[in-house]
Amino acid sequence: MISLDAYRTQWFGNIRGDLLAGLVVALALIPEAIAFSIIAGVDPKVGLYASFSIAVLIAFMGPTAIRASAA
């Protein structure tokens, strides 16, 4: 059985690095979402809302070994 301290270290041990990585990915996603929405012929707000929604959905689904996403 895993102790509570080991569980906390496993999930929250690198929270600073995870937050920094998430911020970098979010900032890199902004121009990409705008560019794809312009190419698709829709308003850039639509691309930003769509990319944000997908990123949040993927974040809450949790990591798996077989999922690959742009977020």
Image (tube, rainbow, N blue to C red):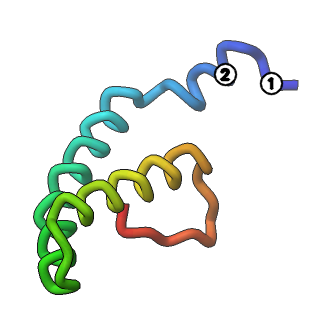
- The residue under label 1 is which amino acid type? Ile
Give the quarter of the figure containing the C terminus.
bottom left
Q: Quadrant of residue 70?
A: bottom left
Q: Is residue 69 above or below residue 11?
A: below
Q: Quadrant of residue 30?
A: bottom left
How far across and down, in percent of the image, does residue 60 sit?
56, 44
Residue for point 62% across, 72% down: 66
Secondary element at tag 1: loop
Q: How many discs mark residues in the rendered view?
A: 2
Residue for point 32% across, 27% down: 16
* The one of 13 and 64 positioned closer to us in this rendering: 64
Q: Is residue 37 above or below residue 40?
A: above
Which residue position is annotated with label 1? 2
How far across and down, in percent of the image, does residue 18 sit?
36, 37
Tag shown at residue 6: 2
Q: In the shown orientation, is residue 2 left or right of residue 45?
A: right
